[in-house]
Amino acid sequence: MTITHLVTHSGGFHADELLSSVVLTRLFPQARIVRTRDAAWITPAPGRVIYDVGRDHDPDRLIFDHHQQNPPLRADGRPFSSFGLIWGRFGRDYLAALAVPAADLDAVHAEFDADFVLPIDLVDNGALSPSGLLADLSLPMLLESLKPVFDDRGPEAEDQAFHRALAIARAFVEAAIARKAAKRRAEGVVIAAIAAAGTGRVLELPMGMPFRAAIDKAGADHLLFVIHPRDRDWAITGIRREPEGFALRADLPRAWAGLTDTAFEAVSGVPGALFCHNACFIAVAANRQAALQLAMIAVRSGEVPVADKCNSVCRPRLQTH
């Protein structure tokens, strides 16, 4: 397929055609983006992909709009934006271009659609509205904040802003894909480590990596803590009870909260204890032996009533796993 032009609408841009452009420019790097509403351009023709404009959806003719009467809908009835339409047609090719393994293509495609594409579709169609303190920090709002301000009336202002925003949007999309692909790579490592742990309560990994989904997949409900080496030390972290939220299967002992170095060593009784977060979800040790000792103490502590452990007063907090 030789594509020479990627055609979308002119004027103010939105997240859906911007993110569609991320996909299409990766697949067709030699194609020129044309931002226009000229009828001659937004009519299907050889060598062009038309998206978010044209009031038609016909993948065979490479036109992907969703503004017409009777617009295309997902199987569950929820609306597409141009991003969802482009992702459905070109997403797997895009993942292959990013070197996602063929065996993982379908899974990563579906996960990215559910976690990233669908929210963009819903916001663009007014079916979902970012709200609360983080509303202006949602990805659609952040990308649209890159539009020119109202009194920047230069003839190239909109197009220049679009291309600047395109580079930023690309970084978000490719980082999200990389993390999902990495999660798939980590799964095999975590499953093997779970087998090695047997009935033990502590999972030892060879490095920091996503582990929560693999623990669920393996049904390893007995695990309470994870330890792994970092650049110069070892981490001990709790495991979330649910994919969402901060509640853990077991917290680190409340008596450790906020302690460092000699104070932490004295209270824990473990030489090499370096730091425990005040929220009791992660601790750091100087070496593997110290990490294992802290983890086993935490296991014993984790088996006492919840009231005796770090409670929700310590939340909210950030956790990467």
Image (cartoon, rainbow, N blue to C red):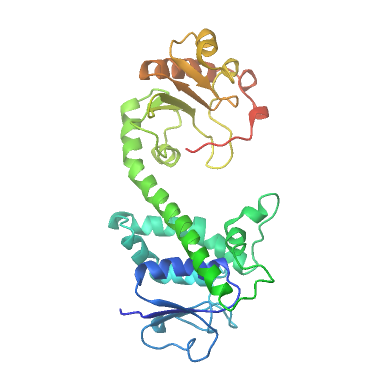
- Vertical side of 177 occupied by 153: above or below: below
- Vertical side of 244 occupied by 73: above or below: below
Tell me where residue 289 sits by quadrant: top left
Q: Is residue 188 left or right of residue 252?
A: left
In what quadrant of the picture does the N terminus appear?
A: bottom left
Residue in the foreground of this view, choosing between 250 and 207 = 207
Q: Position of residue 36 (x, y in %)?
A: 53, 83
Q: Position of residue 192 (x, y in %)?
A: 30, 34
Residue at the (40%, 24%) spot, across then down: 233
- Vertical side of 237 occupied by 300: above or below: above
Camera sees residue 74: no
Q: Is residue 41 left or right of residue 133?
A: left
Residue at the (47%, 72%) spot, across then down: 85
Q: How many marks?
A: 0
Camera sees residue 193: yes
Q: Is residue 286 left or right of residue 16?
A: left
Q: Position of residue 79 (x, y in %)?
A: 57, 70
Q: Position of residue 147 (x, y in %)?
A: 60, 67
Residue at the (37%, 29%) spot, across then down: 231
Spot the residue most to the bottom. Answer: 40
Residue in the foreground of this view, choosing between 203 and 234 = 234
Tell me where residue 122 sits by quadrant: bottom right
